[in-house]
Structures are given as structure tokens and as C-alpha cells.
Image (tube, rainbow, N blue to C red):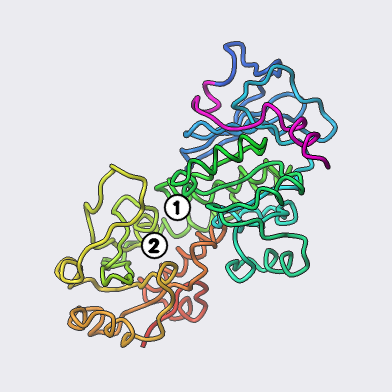
Amino acid sequence: MSLVLLLSLMSGCGTGGGGNSGGSSASDGSFAGLKSTGNVEFKYATQVSIENFEGGYRLISTKEGDKVLVVPEGAKVPDGLAKDVAVLSQPAKKLYLAASAAMALFNAVDGVDNISMSGLNESEWYTTKAVENMKSGKMKFAGKYSAPDYELMISEGCQLAIESTMIYHSPEIKEKLTELGIPVFVDLSAMESNPMGRMEWVKVYGAMVGNLDKAESFFSEKEAEVEAIKGKSKTGKTVAFFSINSSGLAVVRKSKDYVPAMIEIAGAKYIFDNLGDDTNNLSTTSMTLEEFYHSAENADIMIYNSTIEGEVASIADIVSKANVLADMKAIKEGNVWCTSKNMYQATDSIADVIVDMRAIFSNDEEGIKNLKYIYKLK
């Protein structure tokens, strides 16, 4: 496809401000001449909405103003669309994905084949299907989010670039993509404080690849698993979830982050009650090891977060990073665990991680034998 033809096809597609879909429809329930048939239900996610229209059209809108109109295969693109509405005509087979947490959600709705361009290298993916597609050439590396391969994306006919919130740190990249006629959609699932809200973004990607029914079925099944755990009694345990960075600081989750919420659902209590502030969208904060020790000294359980700094093999590995932690209760009692390095990308398995946590917090021997995303350190 020539560059001129591609830009012509994509003209009018892009991103911009303007709120979510609730404000995009006319007062008579229409949008660009399309009649609304109601919204897709989101029970937990607050950063996105999907509005259905007659003829199978769907409008995906985020709180940051991105809008994507999903157009059914063979259907006409409505006239008069605003410039801030990206058009994603089905079949959506030419997607660029830099938002790594979304890959597992695409996988859950059989949508990995819809991603032809990746913002990660083969070795950085943990979703088996993504690795296989990169090995076979079905999915090509098209540059990191901060240095995309514009030429490849144009030659491949990229329909939509799906970015993480990291793209906000490189606004010039977002502007360039839009200038080239490649619309940008920013995945805001990381801004969901409810862990189920993060996983509920599966509906967004189900809608994008024309498999919303499967997305809704998948989510309902996982929700039932979590609801079963919510019905169980609290364990009374306190938990410190952390990692140690290259600067020798303890990196912990803010109290309102989704990980503390998972800990709560699993029946324990996050050791930090009011940590962090709302001045930025970061989910973590750093503190000195001495501060961490004094705040989490008596935590019953410690879970080392390997998704940032890499996995550790033993308690001694942690102590070697920070001798000051040697006298912490959990370390002295040997109640220290580590997440697998792929946990961050396993957005489709949040329910499974909660199941793992419940087994650990309740000391369920059978459950501990079948842990999927957390392992014990000795």
C-alpha cells in the first residue's frame, strides 16, 4: 500500500481531548447518525466506556479523551466524524501493541493474531502465542514506544497504535504518529485501582477484535472465582509487598493501588495504610530501607515483587541487598515469597494471583502446592 493511499484512508483518524462516550452522543442517543442501543456494562473499570450502536458499531472512549469507533466488516464509515475519533474497521488485523499488560487480554479473546506489530522484542513477551508469532514473523518488532519504526508501521498499514501511559512521557511520539495518520489509543488499565477493573479491560480488546461476547464470558468466569474468595473469612495477616531497586531504595505500592486491593480481597491487610498521594499516576513510591524496615518490621508475610527488578532465589538474596531487613519478623520466620517475573503481563490472570495470595495468607497446603504466580523463598 502506498504512503499516499494509506494517509488518505486514515485521514481524520487520531486522538485528542473531549471526555468519554457519555458526552460524545447527541441528546437523542445518536452519534454521527448512528442510533445508540446502550452501553457495555463495566462493573469495576472506571477509565473506559463502550457504547453500542445499531448495525454493530461500537464507540470506545477513555477518560483521557481517546475515542475509537469500531466499524463492522463491510459497513460504511459514518460521514462527519470528528477528527478526534479514530476509525477501526473490521477485521482489525494490523494493530501495533506497546502496552505490554494488554497482550494477555488479547490472548484471552483469541486476538493475538490481530497484533501484527509489537513494541517489545520476542524475549520480553511472556504470552506464549505472542512469542510464537514473533518467531514465525506474523508479529514484527516495530520499535519501542519511545522509538517506533514509523516506516514499518506505515508500510504495514497500521490501523491503531495501542500504547501504555508511558507514551505521555513522550508526547512528541504521539503527535508524530497522529501526524502520519496512525491513530493512538492509550491503555489506561494501569490507572484502575480495582484489580478487577484492570482485568475488565478485556472487554475493550474483545470489542476491538470483534469478540466481545468471549470477553464478557471470560470476565464473568474470573469474577466468579474472585467472588468466591471474597466470601471467605479474613486471615488477620499483614503483608509487605516490595522490591529493592538499583539505588538501594525499597519500592512499594501506594495504598490505593490495585495490588493492596488484591491483598485485601485475598483476606489479608497491606502493611501501609496511607502511603502515597494523588499528585501523579504512579502506582509505586520509594523509601529508604531504614524507613521500610521501621514501617514493615512486624509484617507477617513479605512478598518480593520481581516484575521490576527481577526474580530472587532465596531470602539470603534479599538480605544481601539490604542487611537491615534481616531482623524483620517475616524474614526471621521464613514467611517470604516472590512473584514470578511475568505477573505484570498476566493481566488476564489477576483472579489466579488472588487465588495464590489466598492460599499463602490462609496457609492452605493444597493451594500452596498449586501456586501459579508466587513461590516461596527459603
Disc 1, SS:
helix
Query: Three-letter amino acid code at disc 2?
Result: Ala
Looking at the image, which residue sits at the far top? 28
Gap in Å between the C-alphas at discs 1 and 2? Answer: 12 Å
The residue sitting at 62% across, 16% down in the picture is 29
Which is more toward the observer, 24 or 56?
24
In the rendered view, tell whether residue 316 sits above or below residue 341: below
Residue at numbered disc 1: 195
Query: Three-letter amino acid code at disc 1?
Result: Pro
Residue at numbered disc 2: 266
Q: Name the image quarter holding the N terminus.
A: top right
Q: Earlier in the sequence, mark 1 or mark 2?
A: 1
Give the left or right position of residue 22, taking residue 71 as reference.
left
In the rendered view, tell whether residue 1 sits above or below residue 337: above
Residue 173, image x and y in percent? 54, 44
Q: Which residues are magenta?
A: 1-23
Q: CB under 8 Å between callouts 1 and 2?
A: no
The residue sitting at 29% across, 85% down in the picture is 334
Which is more toward the observer, 14 or 269?
14
On residue 209, which mark appears? none
Mark whose residue sits in front, 1 or 2: 1
Which is more toward the observer, 364 or 260?
260
Asked whether 79 falls inside the magenta stretch, the response is no
Q: Name the image quarter holding the C terminus.
A: bottom left
The residue sitting at 68% across, 63% down in the picture is 130
